[in-house]
Image: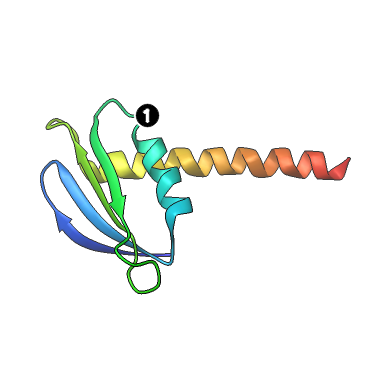
Amino acid sequence: MELELVEKGDDSIMIKIIGEDHTFCNMLRAELLKDDSVISAVYTIEHPLTEPPKFYLKVKKDKSPERVLMEAAGRLVEQLEDLREKLQKELKK
């Protein structure tokens, strides 16, 4: 996965997520929408074979979009680590 900053404002950010598709973008979007400071979290994929997803995040004025994005990514990492640990336990049985 590679990230490319497309646009950054005081309360919004748009990035390209190179090497990912709907699966990852939906997971990130769902996690972001759990945050009360998020106004909008959307992405588009103009053409799945030629264009990476563009992900747009808008937050309330008192929040940093970079911070909100980083916190959501951290929560996803924790959830995936928890899943990995549970899978390891189950698969050892």
Look at 25% across and 46% down and name the residue there. 66
Q: Is residue 59 left or right of residue 90?
A: left
Extreme-bottom residue of the structure: 50
Answer above or below: position of 52 versus 84. below
Q: Is residue 87 left or right of residue 64?
A: right
* 67 or 39, nearer to the observer: 39
Quadrant of residue 34 within the rendered picture:
top left
Say which element carries label 1: loop
Residue highlighted by disc 1: 34
* 82 or 18, nearer to the observer: 18
- Which color scheme does this rendered protein use? rainbow
- The quadrant in which the N terminus is found is bottom left
Q: Position of residue 77 (x, y in %)?
A: 50, 44
Look at 40% across and 72% down and name the residue there. 49
Q: Amino acid at mark 1?
A: Lys
Look at 15% across and 57% down and name the residue there. 7
Q: Is residue 37 left or right of residue 75?
A: left
Q: Position of residue 8 (x, y in %)?
A: 15, 53
Quadrant of residue 27 within the rendered picture:
top left
Q: Can the viewer see residue 62?
A: yes
Q: Position of residue 80 (x, y in %)?
A: 57, 43
Extreme-top residue of the structure: 36
Dot 1: few (<14), some (14–19), or many (≥20) neighbours within 10 Å? few
Look at 26% across and 57% down and name the residue there. 15
* 66 or 50, nearer to the observer: 50
